[in-house]
């Protein structure tokens, strides 16, 4: 009983962490894209 509960919690945490990491990577990609676009806008406005 105790061991199976521990394994379930471990599996749940693994999925939770995986989802967080996946979302973090998506946000990083989005921020990088926004960053590029902002620097392009700054260049356009600068001209």
Image: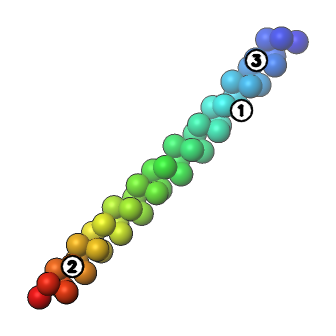
What residue is disc 1 on?
A: 12
Q: Is residue 13 left or right of residue 33?
A: right
Circle 3 crowding by C-alpha within 10 Å: few under 14, some 14–19, many from 20: few
Q: Position of residue 19 (x, y in %)?
A: 60, 45
Decide: marks 2, 1 in contact (CB < 8 A)? no
Mark 2 vs 1, N-terminal side: 1
Q: Secondary structure at mark 3?
A: helix
Q: What residue sits right under mark 3 in the picture?
A: 6
Task: Give SS at disc 2.
Answer: helix
For the C terminus, which image quadrant? Answer: bottom left
| Viewer-side residue, 11 vs 44 | 44
Label 1 Cα neighbours within 10 Å, binned few <14 / some 14-19 / many ≥20: few
Structural distance between the alpha carbons of marks 2 and 3: 53 Å
Q: Give the residue drawn at x 27%, y 69%.
A: 36
- Is residue 9 left or right of 23 when viewed as pictured? right
Q: CA distance from mark 1 to mark 3?
A: 10 Å
Above or below 47: residue 38: above
Q: With respect to residue 13, does 23 lie above or below? A: below
The residue tagged 2 is 42
Q: Position of residue 17 (x, y in %)?
A: 59, 37
Q: Given contact means CB atoms under 8 Å apart, are the residues at marks 1 and 3 in contact? A: no
Q: For numbered disc 1, what is the local secondary structure?
A: helix
Q: Earlier in the sequence, mark 1 or mark 3?
A: 3
Whichever of labels 2 and 3 marks the residue nearer the N terminus, that label is 3
Instruction: Tell me where residue 44 sits by quadrant.
Output: bottom left
């Amino acid at each position: 009983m105790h061991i199976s509960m521990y394994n379930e919690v471990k599996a749940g945490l693994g999925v939770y962490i995986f989802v967080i990491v996946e979302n973090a990577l998506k946000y990083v990609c989005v921020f990088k894209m926004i960053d590029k676009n902002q620097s392009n806008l700054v260049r356009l406005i600068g001209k």
